[in-house]
Amino acid sequence: MNQEFTVAKFGGTSVADHAAMMRCADIIASDSQVRIVVVSASAGVTNHLVALCQTGLSTEERQAHIDGVIAIQLNIIECLSLDADLAHGFDSTLNDFKHAAQHPAQTNAHRDELLSFGERLSSYLFTQVLRDKGVASSRFDVRSVLKTDGQFGKAQPDITQTKTRAQAELVPLLSEQVVVTQGFIGSDEYGDTTTLGRGGSDYSAALLAEACGARNIHIWTDVVGIYSTDPRLCNKAKPIAHLTFDEAAEMATFGAKVLHPATILPAARSGIGVFVGSSQDPQGGGTWIEKVPSSELIAGVRAVTQRKNQLLLTLKSPEMLLASGFLARVFTILSEYKISVDLVTTSEISVAVTLDNAPNASRPELDQEALERLGEFCHVSVETNLALVALIGSEIQLRQSELNLMRVLSDFDIRLICHGASKHNLCFLVEQSQSDTVVQAIHQQLLEQGR
Ligand code: ASP
Ligand code: MG
């Protein structure tokens, strides 16, 4: 296709029920540039699927989660009459789900197979809703093009293969119809289903946009863009009309829940503009994330975010004088276990790193075996119940306004502070029970004073 086109992604709340799906279909019907539609699982479904992956569920508990998934589908399907092609695929997928969910998943591959059903089901239903709006559309199984490695639960995309396959199998379909496909899932070299991590549908949309050569990505969610902080926490939080790729990437990484952190990578790499808006209020504005010339950069703090459920891992070398090579050993093991760390601070003989410890993660970040390996050559301590608070912007320096921050912070216990590696953030760690108050105080001090 040589026409410029858009990949539109609709999150779980946007496809939660039939009425929500209809609003999304209106958005697509009114924008002829949208040629690829990426859908999440309907809200609540992936949480049931994650629960089904746990070991030790009673038969009743297992059945309750299976029924939960089915109820969400039935609630939508009773408003639809599925065309034969979709009905056939939907019924067999639902049967496969019932079968797969009966017994605890024995391997990581089985877990990802089970986790994939949410998006596989919602994409059938959404295609019908779109057809009912008069939009010629077909459902496409993304697993045939979105190729990944075999890290189940957190698979990494194979960009080259994804592009080759998407150009051969997906792009030719776009001139005839809108293609509806799944976020979050892909497949490894053996064709086994993989998942990209919780919230991964945004990332899927960006990967497909890059692979297919789209001009824009529209992420439709339940808020009108990205705010200066979580509006549920501060009623003076303001939507931000424009963000740079760097600012948006930092915000997503450090807790703005609106976007999956990896989404910005393909977009920035390929210069694809990203719009974030609300499917409940499509005229309500939103945030554009784009390349911004340095002359137009807005310097200073533009947002404050937080990420709860952080774990602080402190590693101390017992040998005071043999510190050289210590960091290398620590990070070799972290990388062997594919543990992704966010903040790092060091002293002569110790290093502290933060990692995610999210209760709903499809895979825990810290592996017991990795802890044991680290314990072989250093003293390891683990602290939990922490939250990471991040100030985000461009050209952040400790000038007067940011120094005011120190006064705000003096009311709280700060466990760790990080600044300097990038001018896009200043981060610190606080007790989780205090983090909401810290964010409110910072927002008030730095972002509500006419800046
Ligand atoms: N359904 C997946 C999740 O809830 C992926 C997504 O919605 O982006 O995490
Ligand atoms: Mg999401």
Image (cartoon, grey):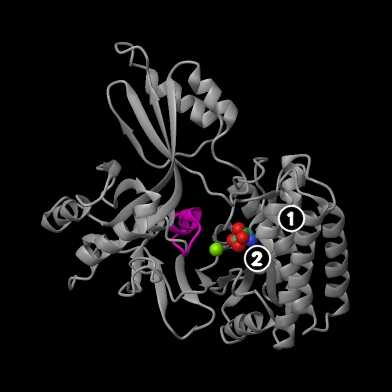
Depth check, mark 1 against mark 2: the one in front is 2
Residue 231: x and y in percent read 38, 71
Residue drawn 46% across the image and 71% down it = 276
Ligand 1: does it lie within 8 Å of the C-beta at label 1?
no
On the image, numbered disc 1 is attached to which residue? 144
Left/right of residue 221 with respect to residue 273 in the rendered view: right
Give the quadrant of residue 316. top left
**Residue at which label 2 appears:** 44
First-in-chain label (1 vs 2): 2
- Label 1 sits on what residue type? Ser
The image quarter in which residue 171 lies: bottom right
- With respect to residue 169, does 326 lie above or below? above
Please tell me whether the stretch drawn in magenta is mainly helix, strand or loop.
Answer: helix
Residues in magenta?
258-272
Residue at x 26% of width, y 57% of height: 394
Give the total number of marks visible in the rendering: 2
Q: Could one spot residue 30 in this view of the protein? A: yes
Q: Amino acid at mark 2?
A: Gly
The reply, left or right, for residue 8 in relation to residue 229 is right
